[in-house]
Amino acid sequence: MMLCTKSTIASLFLVVFAGLHCASSFSSVRHGSHGQLMLSKSTTSPPSQTRTSSTVITHNSISTSTYATISNCWTPQDLTKNNEGFLPIPPNDYIKKYQSNPQLWPVEFFVIVFRHVKSPHQNGKTTTQILVRKSANGTSKYGVGTGVPVTRWMLSLQSPPRGYQVAKPEITFDASNFPEFSTGGEDSRSSWKYSKIDICKDAFHSDATTDEDDMNIFEDAQLQEYASNIRQQLQQDLSQRLQTDKEELSDWDFNVLSTVNSVIDNDNSVAAIQGSFRMSGLFGYTCYNTVDSTASNNQRFVNFDNAPSPTSLAKSTRIYTMFPQMPDPMPSPTSTPQELKEEILSRPRRMQEIGRDPHKDKYGRVYTHISTSNVSNTIHGVYITFDATDLLPGVEDVPPAYDLFGTRPIEREFVSVDDLKVTEEVEVGAALAKLKLLLESVIPRINLFQDSLLDS
């Protein structure tokens, strides 16, 4: 069956999962059969467009701008496969290079939190809420998910951020490999290199730095054990999927699963899982002293005794490959933060002026989200969905988010999916049908889309 979206949808579900749109997705729960991974592929065919003032999807957020709304049909996509009516994908395409050398792929873990509560405004009707944060930069309304890369790209001239190290053996990738790199005209310039960096397996250990007292505030033996058990279950599930269903997987799907499986097999994947949960605040302490960065009591927002089992979390995990709309041309690595912000704000206008399709590249591959200049936004994302129903101390108790090695709480809130609505037309790109499957995966047994929004 092919799902066709309509050009208008009054839903801010796009706010919550804007960064989760995928070219391929893998579910660890098969319909009618638990304990096995299910492959669910999704893509988009060429859309028709109209111009209007609308809401624009960005990575993990949503913002308002003048953009193209579309009517869109969705069919499976292989990012290395040619699309009829478009230029053939060249042999030196960066996705093809990633596929031939899977160590080039960035891989990141995310934690998505939701809960079911009874709404006092709807006669006790149960509603589903998503844990979101307000936009940090004011250009979007909400953000969702706390993500920690296991492995990603960094400018070669930079030093790795805290908790990361340059991959060994060293892996580099030239900026000229990306199609948005300008090679001629007024923008002609020398290329630059990116180096692969990996999270340290002891990133949260006291002996990972000479400043032992500083690291002690991040060390959490219980959380590390929880993350380790999740990783072990993921290893088991992915290995089983690769062995039992190898013959029915396409080359693309098999490569995606194999790449993620290889990353999870590395011991440092535990640190990435632990870090994503630390950033989520789920297992943080309800009272936290921001002066000396210590817990003021021993009560966590979610107690490990009541938390979902690592097995159930592994079964809830989804893998999504994201293919972003990047800046064209790529900004110089010396660009200032203000210049990068201006690039994002002016991109819709510039794309319209030069006739660039905002929804797909010249090879017909559909963009999953709008990206900054961060080349690591072409990723395999591993999404752990966490059901926090009845696990928090009270309905009004909301865990804040944190930076990976930060102590300043970032305010968040639970927002009902019934309240996440806009009146404007929403520029959905490839997103609506993908979002439907994702939401059904994240919130099992909850039908978030009515028939009126989809044509079968």
Image (cartoon, helix red, strand yellow):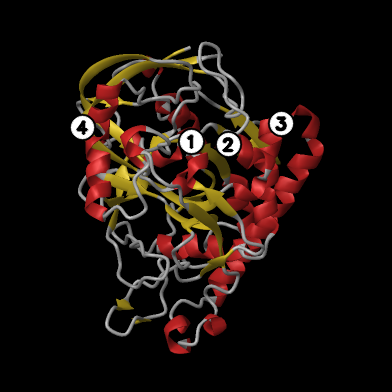
Q: Position of residue 159 (x, y in %)?
A: 46, 68
Distance from Cα at disc 2 to Cα at disc 1: 9 Å
On-image quarter of the N terminus: top right
Give the residue at x 49% y 64%: 275
Q: Mark 4 or mark 2, which has the lower sequence index?
A: 4
Residue 147 falls left or right of residue 309: left
User: Marks 3 and 4: in contact by CB < 8 Å?
Assistant: no
Amino acid tagged 1? Phe
Residue 281: image quadrant is bottom left
- Tell me if label 3 and label 1 are in contact, CB under 8 Å: no
Amino acid found under the numbered disc labelled 3: Asp
Using the rendered image of the protein, determine whether residue 88 is visible from the camera's viewpoint: yes
Q: Is residue 419 above or below residue 80?
A: below
Residue at 57% from the left image edge and 42% from the top image edge? 319
Mark 4 vs 1: CB contact within 8 A: no
Residue under the image location 66 percent in, 32 percent down:
252
Query: Element under label 4?
Result: strand
Which numbered disc, 4 or 1, marks the residue that appears first in the sequence? 4
337 shown above or below 123: below
> Identity of the amino acid at label 4?
Ser
Are dots 2 and 1 in contact, CB under 8 Å? yes
Tell me the SS state at disc 3.
Answer: helix
Q: Which residue is mark 4?
A: 65
Q: Which residue is mark 1?
A: 323
Q: Identify the residue under disc 2.
A: 95
Left or right: 123 in relation to 180: left
